[in-house]
C-alpha cells in the first residue's frame, strides 16, 4: 500500500466487521484477521514491557 499511496487515481478503503453484512464467510475472515492483529499487538506490548524491565529486577540479598 505504501508504494501506491501517492499514485493518482488509487485509493484505499478499510473495512471492519461492522461493514460486512451480506456474507457470513467474509465476516468470519475479517474476524480471524482482527483476532490475529489483537494478539500481535498484545505480544508487541509484552515484548516492550519485558525489554524495558530487563536488568531492573532487584535481587533479594537474603536468599
Image: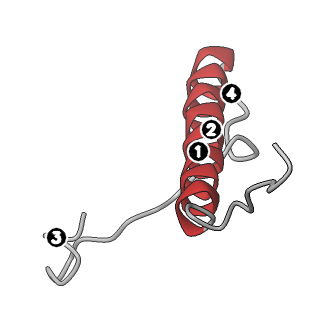
Disc 3 and disc 1 in contact, CB within 8 angstroms? no
Instruction: Estimate the x, y position of residue 36 in percent, counting from the top left.
Output: 57, 33
Choose the circle earlier in sequence order: 3 or 4: 3
- For disc 3, the marked residue is 4
Q: Which one is in front, 11 or 5?
A: 5
Give the spatial CA distance, label 4 vs label 2. 27 Å
Secondary structure of residue under mark 1: helix
Residue at coordinates 56% horizontally, 43% vertically from top-left?
Answer: 37
Instruction: Estimate the x, y position of residue 17 in percent, counting from the top left.
Output: 70, 40
Disc 3 and disc 2 in contact, CB within 8 angstroms? no
Instruction: Estimate the x, y position of residue 6 in percent, counting from the top left.
Output: 18, 84
Residue 43 is marked as 1
Quadrant of image for the N terminus: bottom left
Give the spatial CA distance, label 1 vs label 4. 33 Å
Disc 2 and disc 1 in contact, CB within 8 angstroms? yes
Choose the circle earlier in sequence order: 4 or 2: 4
- For disc 2, the marked residue is 39
Answer few, some or many: residues within 10 Å of disc 1's Cα (few below 14, many 20 plus, some between 14 and 19): few
Choose the circle earlier in sequence order: 3 or 2: 3
Answer few, some or many: residues within 10 Å of disc 4's Cα (few below 14, many 20 plus, some between 14 and 19): few
Instruction: Estimate the x, y position of residue 58 in percent, counting from the top left.
Output: 74, 62
**Residue 51 falls left or right of residue 5:** right
Secondary structure of residue under mark 3: loop
Amino acid at each position: 500500500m505504501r508504494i501506491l499511496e501517492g499514485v493518482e487515481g488509487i485509493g484505499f478503503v478499510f473495512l471492519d466487521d461492522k461493514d460486512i453484512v451480506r456474507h457470513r464467510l467474509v465476516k468470519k475472515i475479517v474476524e480471524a484477521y482482527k483476532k490475529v492483529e489483537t494478539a500481535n499487538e498484545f505480544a508487541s506490548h509484552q515484548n516492550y514491557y519485558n525489554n524495558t524491565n530487563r536488568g531492573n529486577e532487584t535481587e533479594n540479598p537474603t536468599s
